[in-house]
Image (spheres, rainbow, N blue to C red):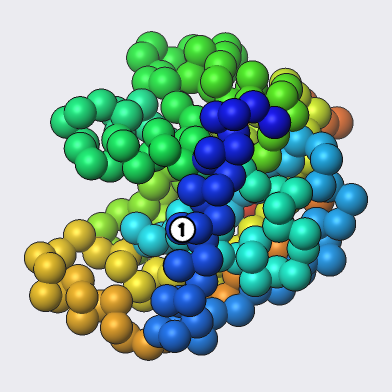
Amino acid sequence: MTRKDKISAVAQMVVSWAALGVFKLLFRFEAEGGENLKGLENSPVIFASNHNSYIDGGIAGASLLKSGVRFKKFFPVKYLVGQQYFGWRYFPVNIFVTFVGSVKLKRAGEKTPDNSHLLRVLSEPIATLASPSKIWIYPQGGFNNDGTPKKPRHGVIFLHQRTKAPIVPVKMIGNDKAMSKLLPFLPAFKTLLMLNKIRVVFGKPVYLLDIPDIDVGTKILMDKIEELV
């Protein structure tokens, strides 16, 4: 592990422990399926989950701590973040995403029918998985301001096919009712304190390398995430 990764691992664990304490207090936070992560400690892993809230990054880190796995073997998990958030326009977000070791997703630019443009978009995540390291990606890329999901993209399956890293499907339940809306401070704070339960479920690792059609592979993955409910 490089010095930079060690710093990122410490930063992530501090943030994740703090998030876990808050989530346990406000949301009766639970995580299940930690047994499905055994044996993956020293290999590259692609965590793929639904995305419905601004606090999903905190939920992801807290879920690894709560899952019962040897979390030190999994940190740092590299979260994939759009390249715009690394710029000073998004200060201090840019400082935070850099400090915790996030990985940059480049802009797609002109998209190609054969998805070859994803080589440019995902060049850093591909190199990260070759380290080997763990990454966390949201197939839907983002979510609507009402907390509803967007259409899934092909990045996860493309990464899987290029790196052969196993995909761990992850389902976050209840996050769509916590900080899922872009609202002024007071309504957003009220939304945060709805005290709904948040539960995270880790599924079994999946390999879809024998499915050449990236659309079919993406649908299978999203179905596996939804099955975890």
Tell me which residue sits at (48%, 19%) in the image: 121
Percent across and percent down for residue 181 are: 25, 64
User: Observer-nearest residue: 142 or 80?
Assistant: 80
* 119 left or right of 70 in image: left
The quadrant holding residue 92 is top left
Percent across and percent down for residue 207 are: 83, 40
Percent across and percent down for residue 186 are: 11, 75
User: Observer-nearest residue: 4 or 195?
Assistant: 4
Residue highlighted by disc 1: 15
Tell me which residue sits at (51%, 13%) in the image: 120
| Amino acid type for the residue under numbered disc 1 | Val
Answer whether residue 176 is visible to the viewer in this image: yes
- Secondary element under disc 1, as helix, strand or loop, is helix
Task: Classify 51 as above or below 192.
Answer: above
Percent across and percent down for residue 119 are: 57, 14
Residues packed near mark 1 inside 10 Å, few (<14), some (14 to 19) or many (20 plus): some
Task: Classify 7 as above or below 190.
Answer: above
Answer whether residue 221 is visible to the viewer in this image: no
Tell me which residue sits at (58%, 44%) in the image: 9
In this rendering, the count of numbered labels is 1
User: Observer-nearest residue: 1 or 109?
Assistant: 1
The quadrant holding residue 175 is bottom left
Tell me which residue sits at (48%, 76%) in the image: 21
Quarter holding the C terminus is: bottom right
Task: Classify 31 as above or below 193.
Answer: above
